[in-house]
Image: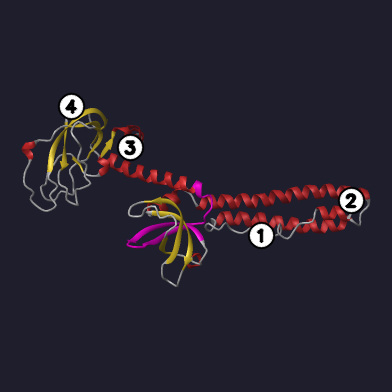
Amino acid sequence: MDSIAASFAITSSENATPRSPRRSPLPSHTNRLMSVYCRRAMFTHRFCQRYCASIKFCTRRESDVRCSVMRIITAFRTILLLGCFVLGAAGTAEAQSPTELVSLVRRSGFIFEGTVRASQGTEPAVVVVDRVLEALPPAGEMKGQEVRVRIKDQKRSKPGQRSIYFTVVTSAGKTLVLDEVGALPPENVDQLEKRIRDARKTIADEGLAKRLKSASWVVLGSAEPPDKAATREPVSEHDPMWKPTPIRIGEILRGKKVDALSVNVAESTDVVWQEAPKPKPGEKRIFLLQPSSERDRWTKTRGLFLVDPLDSLPASELDRVRGLLKGIR
C-alpha cells in the first residue's frame, strides 16, 4: 500500500502557485480565471494527500476502489493545472498583441537584443548590442558594440540583464545614446524579428493608405518633359519652383476618367522640398496626384501636386496599391 501511496505523491514543485509571465502584467480577467483554476488544483491536491494516507488502512477491495477514484481525481487535477498554463500563455499573447507591437515599432528607430554591462544611478546604462533586429538611420550595424540606453525600469539595468530594447536615437556621436520606448524579455527572438518586419510593413501601408485617400487621382503612367516656358526666378529661399508637368496616362486607379492630367513638380532642391518627387521623363510610375498644397505659401499655385516621397511609386508596387485602394472609399 505504501508504494501505491507513493505513486500519487505530489512534489513540492508541482505545489507551487503559477507565477505571472515575465513579459508584462496579465489582464485582470485572465488573473481571475487563473486564480480559480489554481485554488481548485490546490484543493484537489490536499484531498489527494489525505485520500492517499487512508488507503493503507483499507481492505484490498476498498483499496482497489479508492485507487480508481484516485486516478480520476489525479486526471482532474492535471486538467486544472493545464488550464493554468494555457491561461498564462493566452495572457502573454494578449499582452503582446499585434497592435501593441506595432505601436512599439512605430515609436522606435533601433531595436536590438542587448546585455547590460554597467549602470550607475540615473545615468544611461552601458549596453552591449548582441543582435540587431531593426536599425533605421542614423543607427547602423552595431552588433558587438556598446551603446548607452536610458532604461525606463531600473530593475532591468543590473549588469548581466538581457532584454530586447525598443529605442530611439537621441545622440549619434562617438557613442550612440538611446532612449528606451519599451522592452521585452529575450525570448523567441527569431519569431519576434519577423513580427517586427510585419509591423513595419503595416506602418508603411498605413502611411501609403493615407496618401492614396487624400489623392485626387491615382494613375499609372509616365511624366513627359515639363513646360520650359514656366521657368522663373525663385521668389524666396524656400520657393518650391513648381513646374507644370504633363502625365501620359496608362491607367486610372482612382479618380474620374480623364484623357489628360498635368501635375506640379517641385524643381527646388531646398531642404523643404528635396524629398518631393522629381520624376524622370518617360519613366513608368504610379503617381498619387494631390490637391492644392498647403505647404506652398509663396506662389499660391493651384492644381495637382507631387509633394511626399510616397506620391511617386515604382510600377512594381501596383499590386500593393490596388490592394490598399480596395479598402479606401
Q: Tell whether position 279 is magenta.
A: no
Would residue 170 be seen by someone viewing this image from the given angle? yes
Provide the major secondary structure of the magenta segment.
strand
Q: On screen, 23 above or below 150?
A: above
Q: Are marks 1 and 2 in contact (CB under 8 Å)?
A: no
Task: Residue 328: give its label.
Answer: 3
Figure quadrant of the C terminus: top left
Residue plotted at (87% across, 57% down): 54
Task: Residue 259: give its label.
Answer: 4
Closer-to-camera residue (31/157): 157
Closer-to-camera residue (247/39): 247
Cα separation, mark 4 vs mark 3, equals 23 Å
Would residue 151 be seen by someone viewing this image from the given angle? no
Residue labelled with disc 1: 17
Decide which of tag 2 and tag 3 comes sooner along the chain. 2
Q: Position of residue 328 (x, y in %)?
A: 33, 37
Decide which of tag 4 and tag 2 comes sooner along the chain. 2
Q: How many marks?
A: 4
Q: Are marks 4 and 2 in contact (CB under 8 Å)?
A: no
Cα separation, mark 1 vs mark 2, equals 31 Å
Decide which of tag 1 and tag 3 comes sooner along the chain. 1
Circle 2 crowding by C-alpha within 10 Å: few under 14, some 14–19, many from 20: some
Judged by depth in the image, the label closer to the viewer, 1 or 3, is 1
